[in-house]
Image (cartoon, rainbow, N blue to C red):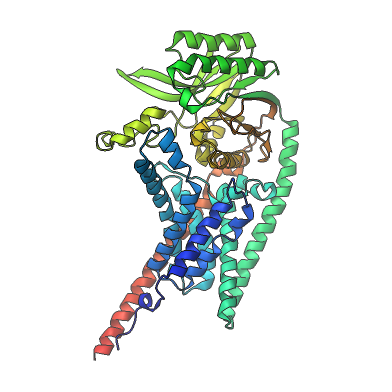
Amino acid sequence: MKPQSPENRQHPFSAQGVFFAVVSGLLLTGAFPQTGMAWLAWVALVPLLRVLDSASVRQGFYAGLAAGCAHYFSLLYWLVPTLRTYGALPWVLAVGCFLLLSLYLAFYLGVFAAVYAGVRNRPVLRILVAPVAWTALEYVRAFILSGFPWEPVGCSQYRILPLIQMADLTGVYGISFLVVLFNSLLAWAIYRLLKKEAFPAAETVGAFLLLVLFLVMAVSAWFYGTWRLKEVSGAMADAPLKRIAVVQGNIDQNQKWDAAFRDATVEKYLALCRRAADTGPDLVVLPETAMPFYFLYDGVATRKVLTAAREAGTWFLAGAPAAATENGAVKYYNSAYLITPQGQIAGRYDKTHLVPFGEFVPLGPLREWLPFVRTIVAAAGDFTAGNVGQTLEMGGLPLGVQICYEIIFPYQARRIVQNGAGLIINITNDAWYGRTSAPWQHFSMVVFRAVETRRAVVRSANTGISGYIAPTGQIIGATPLFVESVKTWAVPVMQTTTVYCRYGDLFAKGCLVGLILVLWYIFRTARGSGKADQKLQGISKH
């Protein structure tokens, strides 16, 4: 009889397996805003991991892909109305773009599941492999193809302040690691209980040690977080304060770039700025592209803004597109202008991390082959990236500016803090997303930039969510969506340098090294198994 390979001995990936994988994906989405049941993240992966108990590497990949599709289809559904309404794409193309992005992101979950399945003969090892692989893949996802680190699993815990304080050591990746480690331990325990077999002694000891590791990490994180909350709160009380006002104009996206509404938009924002100035702020912040014209090129509109700042007698930070001629070519930027109380331009920040196919085409020739891309870019702007880490000087205080989704990239915030920024200002226009869950998802990630850097983050959004996030991660004064609003806060200017700011993603990089070692182990094991099968087949022939 021809001996079966380990691959053939596995049960085929069944409809029941697909069901449990999809359940995991949906539970994972449920942990994020607006559903916001953060506790779901601690159990969401258990159904998937249960499916992987007897799966081959290939079956594991498909199970993970199914879970990833369920997760990202339900998490990023807002892309379809966004592309349809504001990108002017036909339904077929809007849905197609959404599916392509979701499938790409689901691929990472597929790789995670394949790695987990690949160490099925080492049940204790796979408990630890799960958080290591997950964390490493979240880190890689932040860089490949320009990166899209939208809602790492750790971000689901953004309202649990004692837990997330460890982000100033490990970044958000440390919280992701802890969440997935608990999922993995729970899945192992359920698997063993369902098998109703005596636990091998070595496996029992190993699992117990990993349980102890989790408990030590969780308890340490909680005590560390409690201590850091008190310490950082004390530092905030002793820090110098700046009064920052944010303006939320609530300009309809369909009117924002319509020339017929341009003057009305400018006048509305300037009126709101005058209201803000009455509260005595040091700085008034306007959202991304609040001024819907090329600053300095439109002399009349530019003078209105500069005059408003001079009359208010305070600093303005205004989002506006910029144009500059460089080497005979005109380049366009998504920018923020810092204006002095004397009505002079003190500096300009240019967005550095542009949205692929939204603010630029990654490969120029794609314009000719993908004509619909021109439509998307035309709606947002065909921009050039600025310099990472640039800060603006406000009377001796370096300001770190982050435009729109730049704020979801941890390294961006780290760089501006390394360059001396005492405050982080995030300006955005989330009107694109309508009343979907996207604005809340976007806002939840901002919390971690405050904790990682121990800087206050002040956020001004055209239609919301605007607000102030303390260096502890506490959300203060978040505005509702689609309302006109002016808010002013006394914000602490911090100068401390966190471990995360100083050393970056050492924890995540360590997990990446661990993942590479696991992949080597799986490859070596597979080769060894293949050679053993060949020998058995040779014996059976004789």
Residue furthest toward the bottom? Answer: 542
In the displayed structure image, the side of residue 238 where residue 262 appears, left or right:
left
Quadrant of the snapshot with the C terminus = bottom left
Residue 538 at x, y percent in the picture: 26, 85
Residue 294 visible, this orientation? no
Against 501, residue 491 (above or below) is: above
Q: Is residue 24 above or below residue 169?
A: below
Of 475 and 169, nearer the camera is 475
Q: Residue furthest front?
A: 91
The residue at 55%/79% (across/down) is: 195
Residue 405 shows in the view: yes
Question: In this figure, what is the number of numbered marks?
Answer: 0
Q: Which image quarter: residue 212?
A: bottom right
Image position, residue 373 (x, y; %): 33, 35
230 left or right of 392 in image: right
Q: Quadrant of the N terminus?
A: bottom left
Identify the residue at horizontal 45%, vertical 41% (top origin). 79
* Nearer to the camera, 37 or 419: 37
* Above or below: residue 475 compared with residue 267: below
Q: Name which quarter of the figure residue 64 lies in.
A: bottom left
- Horizontal and vertical percent position of residue 455: 63, 35
Quadrant of res 297: top left
Residue 144 place in picture, x, y as percent:
40, 46
- Is 384 drawn above or below residue 203 in the view shown? above
